[in-house]
Image: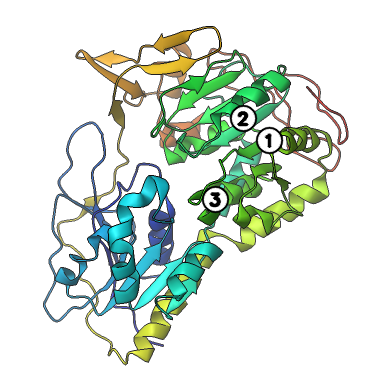
Amino acid sequence: MTTMPGIIYPPNLEFDYLVQRPQQLLKSLSELGVTVYFLNQPAYHQGQYQGIERYNQHLFLFHHTEPSYPATTRPVIYYSNPAQVDIIRGYNPCLIVFDSLDEPVGEFSSWQPYYHQAVSSADLVLAASDKLYARAEAINPHTHLLPNGCDYNYFKRARSNQFIPPDLPELGRAVIGYMGAVASWCDLELLDKLAQVFPDCSLLIIGPLYNVRNIPLRSNIHWLGYKAYEELIYYAGYFDVGIIPFKQSEMTAAVNPIKMWEYMAMGIPVVTTALPETQKYSEELYYSPGRQDFINNVRRALKQENWEKCERRMTLARENSWMARAEQMLEAIQERLRAKAIPSGQNLPIPASASPYKRKNWFYQGEHVHFQSRAKTYAVPRQKENLREIVISAPPVLSAICLHHMNREQAAYSFDIIKQTPAGLNTGGNQVAISIQTANSFHYKNGQKPYLPGEYPC
């Protein structure tokens, strides 16, 4: 077996913000023993970080710091932004891997001028969906289909969550949840319609506004904004149904939704619009050709669930974990190294100056968020600090008990504190009861009785 010389990911993403496919694959590869240099692209955050952090034994984060290694070391370059095609050879690569994540159209049309060169010049192309695979394979025969996946071991923990986030609103008898960026590809009119059709249910929306400003305002739609990856399961654990309300477009036709796998890892029913990649799993989820079908499927998901369906979804998610994807990626890279007769070279060195990794506290600047309803437009001011408008959390609290004394919109907590929080801690809101799902009952909200399969709770 060919020895891996180490992988470098050029600066394109912020490691801690909106954890995506590249971060997940590289984390998993490092757990397989591959040395990884992740060159961080800073997003909005509190403070500027400089230097090198050691995330784990084999993964290193470079902040405003260029990697240094001997000229005889030739790493594998893995990149996902086609606009970087002209700079990657500066890293002296032995192999170039381009990851085709999205169709270079619509919201990603800026990639179009670079796409063909990125695909044609790569030694190996990874494609996240069938459509992306067909497009890339027509240019480069060394194209490998590698769909998205999920961190199964993380998201399955949502089923046993008993922590109550401080900003969790009072919830209806069932929760219809969305987790991800709220962007132009989301059908906001469909969300508004769901809120009207299911007035006794809560729509819990977890994720930042990406390129939209006007979003529907209803008393049962709760826009909680961006949450750190480590905190997602403490909100998603309250979902009864996970939705993928994407518009149909040339761009979304090539999307293999990560949230599809994450919802399934949680065991909850998944309702999706007509995306080709979700249609493959129509027996495990609720595929909806139109808006009315989507609404009807939400009703069915709440009414017709059973333990066997839950088990099938979780099994499928476990088989499609990021670790499984990383193993496939590693095999494809090693195969290309052998095919090109690239000799085993020096591995990327372990940076001597690396400090232990610390998760960042994120702050985001911006204008007012405008909420739109049929009656009027509402301007919701964001939390302010030093006359600059920011969103999201305050710095981590010193003790979990402090949560009880803080305003919900100001409270924040760290992952380490959450892990230590007693299951019965009252954080100031209504105590939300959670029961582990069994063959006959499902988790329930706000102390209300469990509902049985076939019983519509709204």
Instruction: Assess whether mark 1 and mark 3 are in contact (beta carbons under 8 angstroms).
Output: no
In-image side of 91 versus 150 (left or right): left
- Who is closer to the viewer here, 431 or 450? 450
Instruction: Assess whether mark 2 and mark 1 are in contact (beta carbons under 8 angstroms).
Output: yes
Q: Which of marks 3 and 2 is in front?
A: 2
- Who is closer to the viewer here, 291 or 101? 291
Alpha-carbon span between mark 3 and mark 1? 19 Å
Given the current orientation, which residue lies at the most extreme top position? 375
In-image side of 121 versus 130 (left or right): left
* Label 1 secondary element: helix
Which residue is found at the position 38% from the left and 33% from the top? 211
Say which amino acid is labelled 1: Arg
Residue 71 in the image, given as x and y percentages of width and height: 11, 78
Q: What's the mark number on residue 85? A: none
Decide: few, some or many residues near mark 2? Use Cα within 10 Å; few <14, some 14-19, many ≥20: some
* Residue located beneath label 2 in the image: 190
Say which amino acid is labelled 2: Leu
Which residue is found at the position 68% from the left and 59% from the top? 280
Location of residue 437 by image quarter: top right
* Label 2 secondary element: helix
* Residue located beneath label 3 in the image: 257
Whichever of callouts 3 and 1 sits on the residue coming sooner in the sequence is: 3
* Label 3 secondary element: loop
Looking at the figure, which quarter contains the N terminus? bottom left
Whichever of callouts 3 and 2 sits on the residue coming sooner in the sequence is: 2
* Residue located beneath label 1 in the image: 291
In-image side of 190 versus 444 (left or right): left
Say which amino acid is labelled 3: Pro
Alpha-carbon span between mark 3 and mark 2? 18 Å
